[in-house]
Image: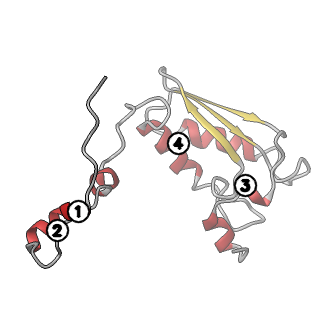
Amino acid sequence: MPEKPPRARVEDAVDPDEETAGEKLSRKRDYLDGFLKKKPESAGEAGAGGELQQAVVEALKEIYDPEIPVNIYDLGLIYGVEVSEDKDVVVTMTLTTPHCPVAESMPAEVEIRAGSVPGVRDAEVNLVWDPPWGPDKMTDEARLELGML
């Protein structure tokens, strides 16, 4: 059986008047400081969280809905961006409604834009209707832009 750690006692507490500034600072250090400053571990160029996926997302943020002055990514029309090890990109997206005026051209524009990112071998768009798009899919930035926040 492992030995139990000693219990904390009131008499063991540090007296704030006897503590030096350096001791107090080291005691009050922010334990999250290193965690918050740490950069995410790179997933490499391909794969989830990789540089290529981020580049595709940034490219998709340059496409704006013609009726709403918000990019399609922040609008919540992009449900997923997957990058394979072969650097093939599959974008899963929807439209605000099936009768959207750009229903024929928007998926093609997304495919062209994703395929034009340097390093992408091939791009494909899967247009889905389930789950249906709703205002809850928008980012806070999009809601703010549209005066909904």
Q: Nearer the viewer, mark 3 or mark 2?
A: 2
Q: Amino acid at mark 4?
A: Val
| Disc on the earlier residue, 4 or 2 | 2
Q: Residues within 10 Å of mark 1 (few under 14, many from 20)?
A: few
Q: Amino acid at mark 2?
A: Leu
Relative to 80, residue 58 above or below: below
Q: Residues within 10 Å of mark 3 (few under 14, many from 20)?
A: some
Q: Amino acid at mark 1?
A: Arg
Q: Residue at x 75, y 58 (%)?
A: 136
Q: Circle 1 is placed at which residue position?
A: 29
Q: Residue at x 71, y 77 (%)?
A: 147
Asked if disc 2 and disc 1 are in contact, CB closer than 8 Å, the reply is yes
The disc label shown at residue 25, or none = 2
Q: Circle 3 is placed at which residue position?
A: 137
Q: Residue at x 84, y 46 (%)?
A: 132
Relative to 89, is 70 on the left or the right?
A: right
Residue 20, position as x, y percentages in the image: 8, 73
Compute the Cα span from label 2 to label 1. Answer: 6 Å
Q: Circle 4 is placed at which residue position?
A: 56
